[in-house]
Amino acid sequence: MNKPWGMTAGGFVCCGLVAGGLLLQTVAGPVRWGMMAWPVNAVVLAVLLLGIVLMHLCRRRVYVFRWMATLQAGIPAMVACVMATMLMGVTRQVPAGHVPTDPIGITDMLTFWPFVLLYVWLCVLLGMVCMTRLQHPTWRSLPFLLNHLGLFLALVAGTLGNADMQRLFMTTQEGRTEWRAVDAQHRVHQLPIAIELHDFAIEEQPKFSFLSDVTVYTKSGITVRDTIRVNKPLSVRGWKIYQYSYDEAKGGMSDISIFELVRDPWLPFVYIGIYMMLAGAVCLFLQPSSVRHFRP
């Protein structure tokens, strides 16, 4: 293909990633995020950042690295990622840890190789763009940097942190303290936090809801007494505790309450990325019109 490359080249790259992803899906099966758990994901992050820096340093001698920091590469990647995300939105996804219900794998998009490769490509392009702007930073480029760095951080943390996220279920009984929970494969996990159920109740006014009066203990000695309601989780030491279910056969007389416990240590970095994008939008709005219409 003759230089300079345009959006057609970007489209070809995305198509190649989809084709390569489908081949990987067929040969190797879905992405096994469990193999990317800490500290492997930290090593992958270091390699990714080092690779972006090296490509940026070599951009003058390698045309493709310069092209990767242009709109001609970025726009097709964003369009492809949006289309993949829309496909995930209109496809009924299986719960985490379950086998896809279709022969291709699109019912579990987070482990679908084409989906993952497209987002990795977008992250690399964002990194290249940020490196180019950081080379000569100015105040008027601050909104651009905040938006792109924030998106890069949110995507990378959300992707690499997926392997470290724990989603467990704990069954508790009134008057007892439980330290164990099970995952989607029914494996038992001994946790650093425990829940003692004091009372379970069902509220029917103003709308049907159920709640649990609990005390949460941690091995570090922290004790929290609170009420956990549907859609109002309790946060303790990095864990979010959701009211999940109860003994439906007993209804309001149930002495059992089931909680969903979620821990995502990378989630704060995702939030930081989102806040950076919001700050970028605010900075862009506050800048004078002459600066907002600046084009690099």
Image (cartoon, rainbow, N blue to C red):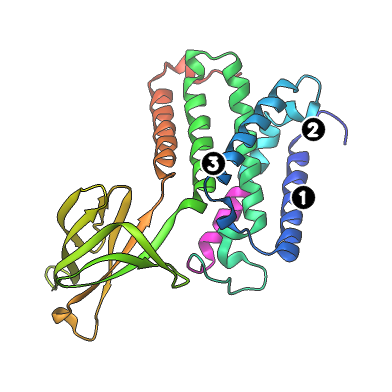
Image quadrant assignment for residue 209:
bottom left
For the question of whether residue 87 can be seen, the reply is no
Closer to viewer: mark 2 or mark 1: 1
In the picture of the structure, the residue carrying the numbered disc 1 is 16
Q: Split into 4 quadrants, where in the image is the C terminus? A: top right
Outermost right residue: 2
Amino acid on which the number 1 mark rests in the picture: Gly
Q: Is residue 249 magenta?
A: no
Label 2 and label 1: CA atoms lie apart by 16 Å
Q: Residues within 10 Å of mark 3 (few under 14, many from 20)?
A: many
For the question of whether residue 194 can be seen, the reply is yes
Q: Residues within 10 Å of mark 2 (few under 14, many from 20)?
A: some
Instruction: Count numbered badges in the picture.
Output: 3
Q: Nearer the viewer, residue 103 or 67?
A: 103
Label 3 and label 1: CA atoms lie apart by 22 Å
SS at mark 2? loop
Q: Nearer the viewer, residue 293 or 117?
A: 117
Q: Residues within 10 Å of mark 1 (few under 14, many from 20)?
A: some
Q: Earlier in the sequence, mark 2 or mark 3?
A: 2
Look at the image and give the residue range highlighted in magenta: 80-95
Label 2 and label 3: CA atoms lie apart by 27 Å
Residue 33 x, y percent position in the rendering: 57, 56
Residue 1 x, y percent position in the rendering: 87, 36
Above or below: residue 97 compared with residue 61: below
SS at mark 1? helix
Closer to viewer: mark 2 or mark 3: 3
Residue 156 badge? 3
In the picture of the structure, the residue carrying the numbered disc 2 is 5
Q: Are marks 3 and 1 in contact (CB under 8 Å)?
A: no
